């Protein structure tokens, strides 16, 4: 609830100012960002956990970290990861021998400072949630968070937020289907507007959120 992923800055700059422009912004982030970054990597991390492949997990965790284009976006990912790790630890859902090498590898199954997406994929794997449902859950959580930001900072009414959910519901399903078709060399977000908004947010005078 403390992070907006640059959306608060987009409000301040006037890029997003009402329900239609917010729906358009979120649709673009879903199409050009999440569908070709977080969602497909969740599947790759899940498969790596299935095969106890700590090397692959570390590589994809590093890859995700490299896609965070500003200090705030990087900090958001690491802080959310740390929070989720504490929660999973309290629920006894972390690897039993955390920090020890995974099977046939010198690399721990979970990186010590794993990011949010990596730990989300781990939680889904541990709970036996199918990959597609995990991807849908991640996308839904992202959308609800962005709309919560808008309800606080735009402001956006809750009825308008529900309309946007209804508008983007089909796009979220399509984003998951797209993510499942992509090869490794097709992955990567293309969100220059989000990166610029996030960078400008670092010096925004009045703000409610940490990103």
Image: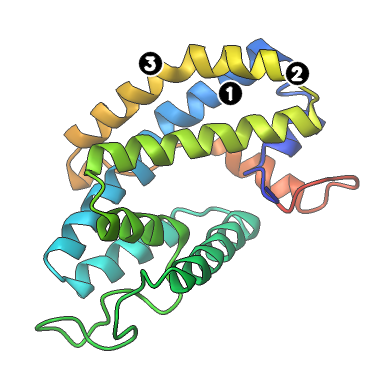
Bin the neighbour count of mark 2 within 10 Å (Cα to Cα): few under 14, some 14-19, many 20 and up. some
Tell me which residue sits at (71%, 29%) in the image.
Answer: 150
Percent position of residue 10, x then y: 72, 32
**Given the current orientation, which residue lies at the most extreme front position?**
91
Label 1 vs 3, first from the N-terminus: 1
What whole-number distance in Å separates the C-alpha atoms at marks 3 and 2?
Answer: 22 Å
Q: Nearer the viewer, residue 177 or 84?
A: 84
User: Where 209 falls versus 170 (above or below)?
Assistant: below
* 17 relative position to 49: left or right: right
The residue wearing badge 3 is 170
Q: Residue 33, can we see it?
A: no
Q: Residue 126, can we see it?
A: yes
Q: Secondary structure at mark 1?
A: helix
Q: Nearer the viewer, residue 90 or 31?
A: 90
What whole-number distance in Å separates the C-alpha atoms at marks 1 and 3?
Answer: 16 Å
Q: Secondary structure at mark 3?
A: helix
The residue wearing badge 1 is 25
What whole-number distance in Å separates the C-alpha atoms at marks 2 and 1?
Answer: 17 Å
Percent position of residue 107, x then y: 24, 83
Marks 1 and 3 close (CB-CB < 8 Å):
no
């Amino acid at each position: 609830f403390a992070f907006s992923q640059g959306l608060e800055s987009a409000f301040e700059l006037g890029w997003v100012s009402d329900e239609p422009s917010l729906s358009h912004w979120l649709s673009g982030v879903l199409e050009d960002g999440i569908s070709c970054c977080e969602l497909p990597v969740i599947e790759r991390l899940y498969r790596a956990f299935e095969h106890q492949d700590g090397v692959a997990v570390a590589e994809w965790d590093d890859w995700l970290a490299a896609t965070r284009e500003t200090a705030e976006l990087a900090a958001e990912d690491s802080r959310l990861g740390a929070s989720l790790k504490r929660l999973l630890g309290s629920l006894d859902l972390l690897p039993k021998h955390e920090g020890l090498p995974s099977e046939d590898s010198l690399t721990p199954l979970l990186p010590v400072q794993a990011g949010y997406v990596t730990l989300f994929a781990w939680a889904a794997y541990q709970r036996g949630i199918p990959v597609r449902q995990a991807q849908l859950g991640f996308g839904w959580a992202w959308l609800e968070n962005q709309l919560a930001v808008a309800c606080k900072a735009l402001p956006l009414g809750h009825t308008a937020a529900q309309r946007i959910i209804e508008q983007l519901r089909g796009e979220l399903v399509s984003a998951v289907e797209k993510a499942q078709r992509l090869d490794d060399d097709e992955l990567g977000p293309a969100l220059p507007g989000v990166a610029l908004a996030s960078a400008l947010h670092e010096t925004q005078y009045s703000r409610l959120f940490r990103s």
